C-alpha cells in the first residue's frame, strides 16, 4: 500500500511540476489527475513510466494527453 505522504509527492512524469496522482479505486494503480493516465503498481511499487502506463479510454497516444501538451 502506498502512503499518503508519498502520494502527495508523486507527479505525472509528463508534467512533473503540476500533475498530481491519485490512487485508483482498485488500489493497485495510480492515476494522473489531469490526464487520467493509469500507472500500474507492482508489489506496492508504482511504475511511473509513460511507456508502461495505460492510456485513458478514447486516447490513442501519449501525445494527445493534456500533460504532454503543457
Ligand atoms: Zn499526466
Image (cartoon, rainbow, N blue to C red):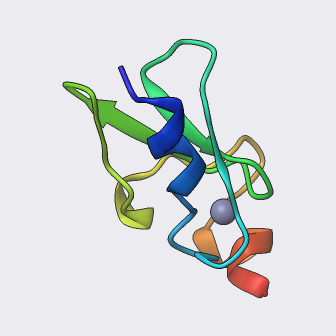
63 displayed left or right of 43: right
Residue at point 50%, 40% (across, down): 5
Residue at point 62%, 50% (across, down): 37
Task: Give the residue at the far bottom of this rendering.
Answer: 70
Q: Position of residue 44 (x, y in %)?
A: 26, 27
Can you say whether 4 is above or below 59 in the image?
above
Q: Position of residue 27 (x, y in %)?
A: 49, 16
Residue at point 63%, 15% (across, down): 25
Q: Position of residue 58 (x, y in %)?
A: 78, 47
Q: Position of residue 47 (x, y in %)?
A: 32, 49
Q: Quadrant of ligand 1?
A: bottom right
Task: Give the residue at the far left of this rendering.
Answer: 43
70 displayed left or right of 24: right
Front residue of 52/42: it is: 42
57 displayed left or right of 8: right
Can you say whether 7 is above or below 51 in the image?
above
Can you say whether 5 is above or below 60 in the image?
above
The C terminus lies in quadrant = bottom right
Residue at point 40%, 28% (across, down): 2
Task: Give the residue at the far top of this rendering.
Answer: 26
Front residue of 41/2: it is: 2
- Residue 51 placement: quadrant: bottom left
Task: Give the residue at the far front of this rendering.
Answer: 5
The N terminus lies in quadrant = top left
Amino acid at each position: 500500500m502506498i502512503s499518503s505522504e508519498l502520494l502527495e509527492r508523486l507527479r505525472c512524469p509528463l508534467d512533473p511540476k503540476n500533475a498530481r496522482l491519485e490512487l485508483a479505486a482498485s488500489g493497485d494503480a495510480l492515476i494522473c489527475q489531469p490526464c487520467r493516465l493509469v500507472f500500474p503498481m507492482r508489489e506496492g511499487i508504482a511504475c511511473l513510466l509513460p511507456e508502461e502506463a495505460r492510456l485513458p479510454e478514447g486516447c490513442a497516444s501519449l501525445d494527445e494527453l493534456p500533460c504532454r501538451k503543457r
